[in-house]
Amino acid sequence: MTEPVTERADQHPSSPAGAAPLVVALRRLDPDLPVPVHAHPGDAGVDLLAREAVVVPPLGRATVPTGIAIALPEGWAAFVHPRSGLAARHGLTVLNAPGTVDAGYRGEVAVVLHNTDATEPVRLARGDRVAQLVVQRVEQVRFAEVDELPGSVRGAGGFGSSGGWTPPPGPVGGAS
């Protein structure tokens, strides 16, 4: 059995000058698709490609295989994020965003896409970029149950408590 690759490379073209990226073992399940790489220096994620053509129906979802499996070292996880262009132009997003790939998972990375458009299907071709994969350090935690939490400036405020949007006056939908 192959162990996760945890050593660091000396340099990598997509890393800031002198920074050594984490080297992650990757198995290509489809030799005709390229290995994911950062498109530009400093990019947080790499694009994930569709291993097969898929149609995401209006308001529907589809699970899209990517043709890769990875072995992350302990203390790391990968997160599947939507691509902003697909979301803005086609209403296509990652349903469980971000999808989580745990360090111990060795199966094919797949993306659950959701089409938010009520009328138009989204057709994806084999090899299309469908999502982004961001690899990050994660901490293991142990929870300590307490009767009271310590105070904070924010307190229990959530779900828009910081403001930022005021609905326009009048009825919803422009009806008079």
Image (cartoon, rainbow, N blue to C red):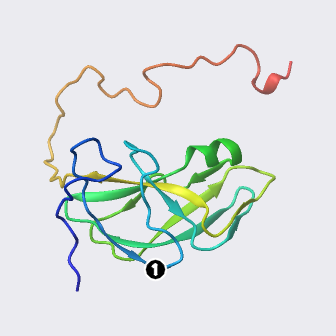
- Give coordinates of residue 76: x percent, y percent: 25, 58
Residue located farthest toward the bottom when viewing the structure as drawn:
1
Depth check, front residue: 165 or 13: 13
Check disc 1 and report the residue beneath it.
29
Give the mark count.
1
How crowded pointer 1 is (Cα within 10 Å; few <14, some 14-19, many 20+) is rated as some
Residue 16 against residue 142 in the figure, above or below: above
Residue located farthest toward the right when viewing the structure as drawn:
176
Judged left or right of residue 130, residue 142 is left
Residue 163 against residue 100 in the figure, above or below: above
**Occupied quadrant, residue 73:** bottom left
Q: Residue at x 17, y 34 (%)?
A: 148
Which amino acid type is marked by label 1? Leu
Quarter of the image that includes the N terminus:
bottom left
Judged left or right of residue 96, residue 173 is right
- Give coordinates of residue 47: x percent, y percent: 49, 56
Residue 99 against residue 33 in the figure, above or below: above
Q: Residue at x 61, y 44 (%)?
A: 85
Residue 165 against residue 122 in the figure, above or below: above
Quarter of the image that includes the C terminus:
top right
**Occupied quadrant, residue 70:** bottom left
- Give coordinates of residue 154: x percent, y percent: 30, 23
Residue located farthest toward the top when viewing the structure as drawn:
169
Q: Residue at x 57, y 58 (%)?
A: 130
- Give coordinates of residue 156: x percent, y percent: 33, 28
- SS for callout 1: loop
